[in-house]
C-alpha cells in the first residue's frame, strides 16, 4: 500500500458561508468541490496537493464548545484538533498575523522541540493547530520515543510489526473488483 496523505477530514457546520469565509478567504485554502441539495452541502477545501478538509452543512448544527488543544477529557471522545502543516516559521507568523488582524484568537508561537505551532479555533469551534518543522529536526527520518513509561507494544518500534493481524489469504480478483456509485458523481457531469 502507498499512502499519500489525508484525502480529507470531514467536519460539520451549520454555517457554510461563515466556514467558506474563514477557510477560503482568511486562511487561503481553495474551495475545490461542492456538493449540495436542500438540507445538505458537502464542500472541500484544498490544504495541499494531496490533503483536503471538508465540511458537511446540516440544518441544526451548532458550533462545538471550544476545548483547549490537548487538554484531557473524560467520557466518549474521538477528536481533539486538526493540525495543518506549513512550510516554515514565516508561514506560521503569516497565519498568526492574519488571524489577529481578523480578531480571531490565536496563540503565541510555541516551540515543541520538533515543530513550532500556533493554535486557534474556526467559526465552528474546531480546534486548529498550524505547525512547521524545526530546522534540522525530522522525526519522520529519525523517530524519537521519550515516553518515560511506554507500553510493550510501543517498545516494538516505529515500523509496522508483521504477523500481528491476519494475512490476506484471498485478495479480491480483478474480475470481482466493483466500484459502486455514490455522492459526488454529479461533479463529473459539471466538468464535461
Image (tube, rainbow, N blue to C red):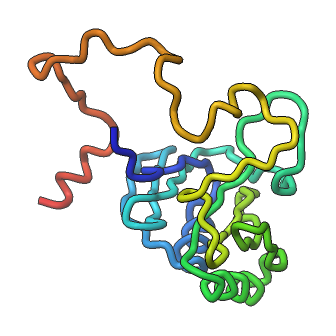
Residue 97 lies, in percent from the top left, at 72, 89
Please identify the quadrant where the C terminus is shown: bottom left
Task: Work out whether residue 115 or residue 184 is closer to the camera in this orientation and state it.
Answer: 115
Which residue is pictured at 44% across the width and 12% down the height?
166
Left or right? Give the position of 148 relative to 48. Answer: right
Q: Quadrant of residue 89?
A: bottom right
Quadrant occupied by the N terminus = top left
State the residue in front, 16 or 93.
93
Left or right of residue 54, residue 59 in this image: right
Quarter residue 140 falls in = bottom right
Residue at the spot 29% in from the left edge and 9% down from the top edge: 169
* Residue 63 x/y as whole percent: 75, 53
Q: State left or right for residue 3 relative to residue 111.
A: left
Against 157, is 10 above or below?
below
Judge from the rendering whether residue 117 lies leftward or rightward of residue 68; answer left or right. Answer: left
Q: Is residue 110 above or below residue 157?
A: below
Using the image as rendered, state which of residue 79 and residue 92 is in the foreground. 92
Q: Residue at x 57, y 74 (%)?
A: 86
Q: Residue at x 79, y 83 (%)?
A: 103
Amino acid at each position: 500500500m502507498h499512502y499519500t496523505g489525508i484525502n480529507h477530514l470531514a467536519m460539520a457546520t451549520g454555517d457554510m458561508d461563515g466556514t467558506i469565509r474563514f477557510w477560503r478567504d482568511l486562511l487561503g485554502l481553495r474551495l475545490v468541490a461542492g456538493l449540495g441539495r436542500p438540507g445538505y452541502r458537502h464542500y472541500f477545501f484544498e490544504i495541499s496537493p494531496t490533503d483536503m478538509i471538508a465540511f458537511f452543512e446540516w440544518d441544526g448544527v451548532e458550533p462545538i464548545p471550544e476545548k483547549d488543544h490537548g487538554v484531557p477529557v473524560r467520557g466518549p471522545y474521538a477528536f481533539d484538533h486538526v493540525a495543518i502543516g506549513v512550510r516554515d516559521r514565516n508561514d506560521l507568523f503569516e497565519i498568526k498575523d492574519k488571524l489577529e488582524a481578523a480578531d480571531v484568537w490565536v496563540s503565541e508561537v510555541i516551540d515543541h522541540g520538533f515543530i513550532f505551532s500556533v493554535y486557534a479555533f474556526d467559526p465552528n469551534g474546531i480546534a486548529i493547530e498550524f505547525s512547521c518543522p524545526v530546522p534540522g529536526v525530522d522525526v519522520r527520518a529519525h523517530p524519537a520515543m521519550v515516553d518515560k513509561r511506554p507500553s510493550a507494544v510501543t517498545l516494538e518500534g516505529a515500523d509496522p510489526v508483521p504477523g500481528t493481524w491476519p494475512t490476506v489469504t484471498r485478495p479480491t480478483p480483478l474480475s470481482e473488483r466493483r466500484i459502486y456509485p455514490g455522492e459526488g458523481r454529479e461533479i463529473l457531469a459539471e466538468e464535461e
